[in-house]
Image (cartoon, helix red, strand yellow):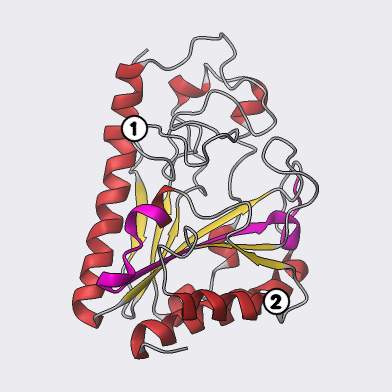
């Protein structure tokens, strides 16, 4: 099967301060020819990180740069390694070009899965451009400011038996077990979460995906943090996946406090 898209691989806004917010799983676009191969369920792209741009609508006020995916993770997952290596050995994960949903139902109605050539085309058209832009902006901000924080923003259903038992904590911070971010910043972010009405953990079930692990280089002044937050904190977790403004308004100050702490750390070297 061939693959083609008419949509750009990302949207990007350059900021003025040393913070880059990456949103690799908010995209919902699936090219029509590919969508025709999907099941009815898959065409709803249920595993999207819904509404994060709206949830982080204060990013421009903070002077942050913002990089946003346009295509669904079902087309290509921007937070997986390009070689499709499993980030959590021994645990079930979805692939660079997923073939099933988080509920382990098939994405492809006809059972014809993407082959190596199609996966390469998707990777070249979407994955590499997103990552080139991410890397360019990190280097620009580091050059200008001397230090930068990469905030990889995600959300997920609070109950997903495929990936974890029971209900996930609300705020799941990941720093690749401390490798992608200096400890004082990570501990400050955790303290902000734990001081709120939400449950918060550091390097629990979600330690950070490919983006956090690949680009976090504290020794070079690039600190990467992934936040995987439960969708029930701000939206409906089932169709029609509506944004819940009152619920979202309650968690936004916590997110803002975390990003403000990240900026203080990048700009002053302390929290």
Residue 216 horizontal side relative to residue 102, left or right: left
Question: Is residue 15 in sight in this rendering?
Answer: yes
Q: Secondary structure at mark 1?
A: loop
Image quarter hosting the N terminus = top left
Question: Is residue 4 in sight in this rendering?
Answer: no
Q: Nearer the viewer, residue 215 or 263?
A: 215
Tally of marks: 2
Q: Is residue 18 above or below residue 151?
A: below
Give the magenta part as a residue range: 213-237
| Residue at the left extreme of this rendering | 143
Residue visible at 76% across and 57% down in the picture = 232
Residue visible at 63% across and 57% down in the picture = 204
Residue 254 horizontal side relative to residue 31, left or right: right
Which residue is denoted by mark 1 in the rendering? 83
Q: Nearer the viewer, residue 52 or 200?
A: 200
Q: CA distance from mark 1 to mark 2?
A: 36 Å
Q: Is residue 235 above or below residue 114?
A: below
Mark number, residue 137: none
Residue visible at 56% across and 8% down in the picture = 110
Q: Does the magenta-highlighted stretch encompass residue 234?
A: yes
- Residue 126 coordinates in the image, percent (x, y): 33, 39
- Residue 9 coordinates in the image, percent (x, y): 34, 44
Residue visible at 21% across and 70% down in the picture = 140
- Residue 8 coordinates in the image, percent (x, y): 33, 43
| Residue at the right extreme of this rendering | 166
Q: Nearer the viewer, residue 67 or 265?
A: 265
Q: Earlier in the sequence, mark 1 or mark 2?
A: 1
Q: Secondary structure at mark 2?
A: helix
Which residue is denoted by mark 2 in the rendering? 194
Mark 2 burial class by Cα count in 10 Å: few <14, some 14-19, many 20+: some
Q: Does the magenta-highlighted stretch encompass residue 89?
A: no
Q: Is residue 30 above or below residue 55?
A: above
């Amino acid at each position: 099967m061939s693959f083609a898209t008419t949509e750009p691989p990302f949207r990007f806004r350059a900021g003025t301060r040393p913070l880059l917010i990456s949103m690799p799983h908010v995209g919902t676009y699936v090219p029509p020819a590919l969508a025709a191969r999907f099941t009815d369920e898959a065409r709803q792209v249920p595993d999207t990180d819904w509404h994060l741009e709206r949830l982080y609508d204060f990013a421009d006020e903070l002077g942050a740069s913002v990089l946003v995916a346009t295509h669904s993770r079902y087309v290509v997952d921007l937070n997986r390694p390009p070689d499709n290596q499993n980030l959590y050995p021994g645990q079930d994960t979805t692939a660079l070009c997923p073939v099933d949903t988080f509920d382990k139902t098939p994405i492809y109605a006809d059972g014809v899965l993407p082959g190596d050539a199609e996966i390469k085309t998707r990777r070249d058209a979407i994955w590499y451009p997103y990552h080139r832009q991410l890397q360019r902006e990190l280097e620009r901000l580091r050059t200008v400011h001397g230090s930068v924080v990469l905030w990889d923003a995600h959300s997920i259903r609070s109950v997903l038996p495929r990936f974890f038992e029971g209900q996930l904590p609300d705020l799941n911070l990941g720093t690749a077990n401390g490798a992608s971010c200096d400890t004082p910043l990570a501990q400050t972010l955790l303290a902000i979460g734990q001081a709120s009405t939400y449950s918060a953990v550091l390097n629990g079930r979600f330690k950070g995906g490919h983006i956090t692990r690949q680009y976090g280089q504290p020794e070079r002044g690039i600190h990467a943090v992934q936040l995987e937050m439960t969708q029930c904190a701000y939206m409906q977790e089932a169709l029609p996946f509506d944004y819940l403004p009152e619920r979202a308004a309650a968690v936004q100050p916590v997110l803002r406090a975390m990003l403000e702490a990240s900026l203080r750390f990048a700009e002053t070297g302390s929290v």
